[in-house]
Image (tube, helix red, strand yellow):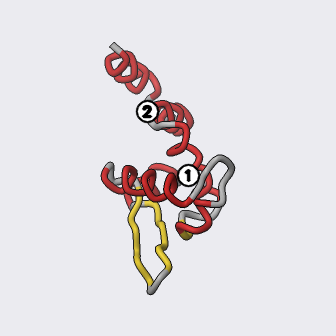
Amino acid sequence: MLSSLSYFKLQKSEGNKEVLLDLFFQFLGKEENKVLQHLMKTEGDATQSDISRLEGMNRVKAYRIIQKMQGKGLIEVIPFGKVRNIVLSSKIKKVLK
């Protein structure tokens, strides 16, 4: 039901970016939204440590959310020594621009 309503809303929008982003955020969890908003503020690049310092986050929760988002193809994790850089996927960057 929700997916069919979303489909009709997309057809009516004719490429309206705000509507597409609003629909996109509706399908994410609260923590995933928080991580995505943070990545948008930092131009699509942050460390896992930065994400774990967000309100309501800790290291374990940040790790699990990042793994979940990586599985969905929303972000990419780039290890650099002991630091894990979190980057928005190229597909998501295109939608957000």
Answer few, some or many: residues within 10 Å of disc 2's Cα (few below 14, many 20 plus, some between 14 and 19): few
Answer few, some or many: residues within 10 Å of disc 1's Cα (few below 14, many 20 plus, some between 14 and 19): many
Does residue 78 appear in the picture of this structure? yes
Secondary element under disc 2, as helix, strand or loop, is loop
Quarter in which the N terminus is drawn: top left
Secondary element under disc 1, as helix, strand or loop, is helix
Q: Nearer the viewer, residue 30 or 64?
A: 64
Residue at 53 percent across and 33 percent down: it is 22
Instruction: Name the residue at the top extreme.
Output: 1
Above-or-below relation of 58 to 43: above
Amino acid bearing label 1: Val
Instruction: Name the residue at the bottom extreme.
Output: 81
The answer to which quarter of the image holds residue 51 is: bottom right
Marks 2 and 1, the one that precedes in the sequence: 2
The residue labelled by disc 1 is 35
Provide residue 85's location: percent of width, then percent of height: 48, 73
Residue at 41 percent across and 78 percent down: it is 79
Q: Nearer the viewer, residue 12 or 19?
A: 19
Amino acid bearing label 2: Phe
Does residue 94 appear in the picture of this structure? no
Q: Nearer the viewer, residue 78 or 1?
A: 78
The residue labelled by disc 2 is 27
Provide residue 73's location: percent of width, then percent of height: 33, 54
Provide residue 72's location: percent of width, then percent of height: 32, 49
Are the residues tagged 2 and 1 within 8 Å (C-beta)? no
